[in-house]
Image (cartoon, grey):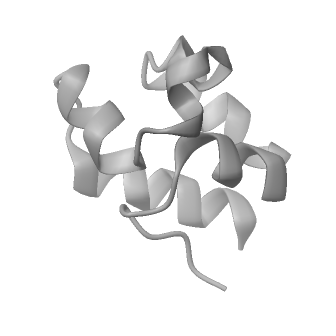
Amino acid sequence: MTITKDMMLAETVQKWPETIPVFINFGMGCIFCEVADFETIEEGALAHEIDVDELMKGLNEAIA
């Protein structure tokens, strides 16, 4: 399965804990806050001014 940018942050971390270091390396500590249940990966990346495509590449490499 592939991680997509429309997936919720919390759901992604729960399904694939190996993505946690990727989020942290990109500066997205928000994966542990309450907003993570209601925010997509893309929304979180945009809020932190992170290149969504680069983040997605890193996330999918982590679960490969």
Total label count? Answer: 0
Residue 3: quadrant of the picture = bottom right
Residue 46: quadrant of the picture = top left
Residue 16's spot in the image, x, y percent?
79, 55
Is residue 12 shown left or right of residue 6? right
Residue 40's spot in the image, x, y percent?
40, 48
Q: Residue at x 25, y 57 (%)?
A: 53
Please tell me which residue lies in front, 17 or 26: 17
Vertical relation: 60 (above or below) 8: below
Please tell me which residue lies in front, 23 or 38: 38
Is residue 49 shown left or right of residue 64? left
Vertical relation: 33 (above or below) 8: above
Residue 47's spot in the image, x, y percent?
21, 23
Vertical relation: 20 (above or below) 55: above
Please tell me which residue lies in front, 43 or 57: 43
**Residue furthest to the bottom:** 1
Residue 17's spot in the image, x, y percent?
83, 44
Q: Which quarter shows the C terminus? A: bottom right
Q: Residue at x 52, y 51 (%)?
A: 8
Q: Residue at x 55, y 54 (%)?
A: 59
Q: Which quarter shows the N terminus? A: bottom right
Is residue 18 shown left or right of residue 49? right
Q: Residue at x 25, y 19 (%)?
A: 48
